[in-house]
């Protein structure tokens, strides 16, 4: 099922995910699915019909779900664990850390309906922290596909990865991105557009919005580079550093909290190796108010317009700084402030009071 | 056996083995273990019991020495579980220590990962790695961490340490064996205190529902958890009824009679997972450690070590 948004067809990536998984299961008898009563929400109805014995439904029990997957992997099977991202990652975080990542087994954890996908169901059902806490775990590859094509290719890649993988499967509608024939490559950012004024580094459902933002910026003669950072961990440091060097300004965009996810990952590289001005777009460390997904994305500025505005703001403030370091009028003003603070400020130097 | 242990300890000079799993290693200890298993299989009952108990007491001596030397460990739990490990490694598990990744091996999971010391000694006695490597227990960069690391130690099926992780993994392993139409079985040793973790009951429910006849859980029922009695912390009883109500077959055995544990562990039934409540004594074999809370993780002084070794001597 796809929905039309104006002229663009939008896709629910869970469909591409489920189709690819079923195809994969036909090719590879080692592929099994583990789920937590999530047959319909993970689009597993067809898989269940075709491979009933290869679907392990543990019921509503996330810790058990992840542990069971580790046991299946220890027997040489390839478990795809399918459950709603918020519950799988929060409830079973220790199992993900110990049974999967530390034990180093080939399990593909598929976090369905992540980010703000559950919209009006509220913050209990939002999965905006998953990227942050999973990124903190060693030996876990984190893939966040941005469209149905990348979702399918990521599923296939994950089945042969022979290592622990988390796959974040989007529910919110996204268009098929025109990549001119380029395929998903794990660990590699996909550059969708080049530009020298600012880099927009986006992930998941934010990628099409970043592309549209670049189009809006181009109308104002601002050329933006757009990177689809489909692998969050390990991060494509080379692509990040090139973006920093070539554009000098980076905006990151994620359907997740800004505390610890994509923006933090990019900043960790940038501040250590080539500091440039950055803006981190995402959910700003709050529980979302009530509202549907589209409303919430707009509320947090996670739209093409919001991204373009952040980029413009970054460009204008960066211009000011540049002027300052060149010794322009701002530098003089800053110099005055510094002098005042050092010598005359009553706060810093309470001369004569004692 | 004790002499054999000593000889190996001096014969091997091992540096820290970060990733022993990557080593190809065939120990004369494997042959020794095989001979012992064969002997036990054909011996009369009292002799089988004597051989297994002696192995367990040797292992206890080794673990007490190891923990004392390292200055870290969970000695009470190590001593409590040792007869269960003896029964499993000497007459229950179908394994090949010289080929730890053999597809058709029975899976053994130590859910109470803090008994890593006991597990390491058992694995070394079977020849999974040199007994001399035990000298590196918790040493910097050692494969033998305070809790078992699957990536580093041959014979460890899943990394454990946080409680309530082993049973779900064992259930997955049992489901896999059934899917693959394999005859292999899955054994998991649970601490009694860790049954307070809810994840065990998620897994117990699933095992009963799926009628996993190839799964055997053995509860090391020593009645003490870190701080006090299980029954005064968060009551486990009636434990038999709890497992039975989750559609498990339940047997209560003397956890310090390796023969009783072995025969109960081999007595599985199609249609139901099996739970053995193995009654044990925390600190078993050393009078001043038995049933004493402080020996959950206390380290013996030199004089205490000598006294313990003397008590554990065959």
Image (cartoon, coloured by chain):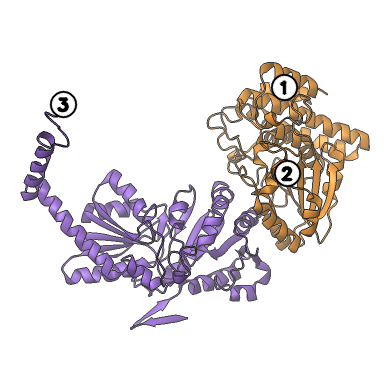
Chain colours: A purple, B orange
Q: CA distance from mark 3 to mark 1?
A: 78 Å
Sort mark 1 into few (<14), some (14-19) or many (20+) by Cα contacts within 10 Å: few
Residue A220 occupies quadrant: bottom left
Q: Which mark is residue A277?
A: none
User: Residue B122: x percent and y percent?
Assistant: 72, 35
Using the image, name the chain to which the residue with label 1 belongs: B
Q: CA distance from mark 3 to mark 2?
A: 69 Å
Residue B207 vs residue B48, the one in the foreground = B207
Label 3 SS = loop
Residue for badge 3: A354
Residue for badge 2: B192
Q: Let me know if residue A316 appears in the view.
A: yes
Residue A347 vs residue A69, the one in the foreground = A347
Using the image, name the chain to which the residue with label 3 belongs: A
Sort mark 3 into few (<14), some (14-19) or many (20+) by Cα contacts within 10 Å: few
User: Residue A12: x percent and y percent?
Assistant: 45, 74
Sort mark 2 into few (<14), some (14-19) or many (20+) by Cα contacts within 10 Å: many
Q: Is residue A12 left or right of residue B109?
A: left
Q: Is residue B178 left or right of residue B37?
A: left
Residue A52 occupies quadrant: bottom right
User: Residue A341: x percent and y percent?
Assistant: 13, 38
Q: Let me know if residue B213 appears in the view.
A: no
Q: Name the front one of labels 1 and 2.
A: 2
Residue at left offset 83%, top offset 32%? B53
| B166 shown above or below B306 | below
Q: Are marks 3 and 1 in contact (CB under 8 Å)?
A: no
Q: Is residue A234 left or right of residue B26?
A: left
Q: Which mark is residue B6?
A: 1
Q: CA distance from mark 1 to mark 2?
A: 34 Å
Q: Name the front one of labels 3 and 2.
A: 3
Q: Are marks 3 and 2 on the same chain?
A: no
Residue B138 vs residue B90, the one in the foreground = B138
């Amino acid at each position: 099922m796809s929905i039309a948004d104006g002229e663009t067809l939008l896709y629910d990536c869970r469909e591409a995910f489920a189709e690819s998984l079923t195809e994969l299961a036909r090719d590879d008898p080692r592929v099994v699915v583990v789920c937590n009563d999530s047959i319909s929400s993970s689009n597993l109805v067809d898989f269940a019909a075709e491979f009933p014995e290869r679907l392990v439904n543990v019921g509503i029990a996330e810790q058990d779900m992840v542990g069971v997957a580790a046991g299946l992997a220890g027997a040489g099977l390839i478990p795809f664990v399918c459950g709603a991202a918020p519950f799988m990652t929060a409830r079973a975080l220790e199992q993900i850390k110990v049974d999967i990542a530390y034990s180093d087994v080939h399990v593909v954890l598929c976090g369905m309906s992540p980010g703000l996908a559950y919209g009006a169901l509220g913050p209990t059902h939002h999965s905006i922290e998953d990227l942050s806490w999973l990124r903190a775990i060693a030996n876990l590859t984190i893939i966040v596909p941005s469209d149905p094509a990348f979702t399918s290719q990521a599923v296939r890649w994950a089945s042969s990865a022979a290592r622990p993988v988390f796959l974040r499967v989007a529910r919110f509608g996204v268009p098929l991105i025109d990549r001119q024939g380029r395929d998903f490559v794990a660990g590699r950012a996909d550059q969708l557009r080049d530009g020298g004024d600012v880099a927009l580094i986006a992930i998941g459902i934010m990628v099409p919005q970043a592309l549209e933002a670049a189009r809006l910026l181009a109308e104002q003669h601002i050329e933006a580079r757009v990177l689809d950072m489909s692998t969050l961990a390990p991060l494509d440091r080379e692509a990040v550093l090139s973006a920093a060097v070539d554009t000098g300004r980076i905006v990151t965009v994620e359907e997740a909290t800004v505390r610890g996810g994509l923006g933090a990952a990019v900043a960790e590289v940038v501040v250590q190796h080539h500091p440039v001005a950055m803006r981190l777009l995402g959910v700003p460390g709050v529980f979302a108010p009530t509202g549907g997904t589209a409303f919430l994305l707009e509320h947090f500025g996670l739209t093409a317009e919001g991204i373009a505005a952040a980029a413009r703001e970054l460009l204008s403030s960066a211009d000011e700084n540049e002027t300052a370091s060149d010794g322009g009028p701002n530098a003089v003003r800053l110099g005055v402030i510094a002098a005042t603070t050092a010598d005359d400020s009553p706060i810093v130097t309470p001369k004569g009071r004692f | 056996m004790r002499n054999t242990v000593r000889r190996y300890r001096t014969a091997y000079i091992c540096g820290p083995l970060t990733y022993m799993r990557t080593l190809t290693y065939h120990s004369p200890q494997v042959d020794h273990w095989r001979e012992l298993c064969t002997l036990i299989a054909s011996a009369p009952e009292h002799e089988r019991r004597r051989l297994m108990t002696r192995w367990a007491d040797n292992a206890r001596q080794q673990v007490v020495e190891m923990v004392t030397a390292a200055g870290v460990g969970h000695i009470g739990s190590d001593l409590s579980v040792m007869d269960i490990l003896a029964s499993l490694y000497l007459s229950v598990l179908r394994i090949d220590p010289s080929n730890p990744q053999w597809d058709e091996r029975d899976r053994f999971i130590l859910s109470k990962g803090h008994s890593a010391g006991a597990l390491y000694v058992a694995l070394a006695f079977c020849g999974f790695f040199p007994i001399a490597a035990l000298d590196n227990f918790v040493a910097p960069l050692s494969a033998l961490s305070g809790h078992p690391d699957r990536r580093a130690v041959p014979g460890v099926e899943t990394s454990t340490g946080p409680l309530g992780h082993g049973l779900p993994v064992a259930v997955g392993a049992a489901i896999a064996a059934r899917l693959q139409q394999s005859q292999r079985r899955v054994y998991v040793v649970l601490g009694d205190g860790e049954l307070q973790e809810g994840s065990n009951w998620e897994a117990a429910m699933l095992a009963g529902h799926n009628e996993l006849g190839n799964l055997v859980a053995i509860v090391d029922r020593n009645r003490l958890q870190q701080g006090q009695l299980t029954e005064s912390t968060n009551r486990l009883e009636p434990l038999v009824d709890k497992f039975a109500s989750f559609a498990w077959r339940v047997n209560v055995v003397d956890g310090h009679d390796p023969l009783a544990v072995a025969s109960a562990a081999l007595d599985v039934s199609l249609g139901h997972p099996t739970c053995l409540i193995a009654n044990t004594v925390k600190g078993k074999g050393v009078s001043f450690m038995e049933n004493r809370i402080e020996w959950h993780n206390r380290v013996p002084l030199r004089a205490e070590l000598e006294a313990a070794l003397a008590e554990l001597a065959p």
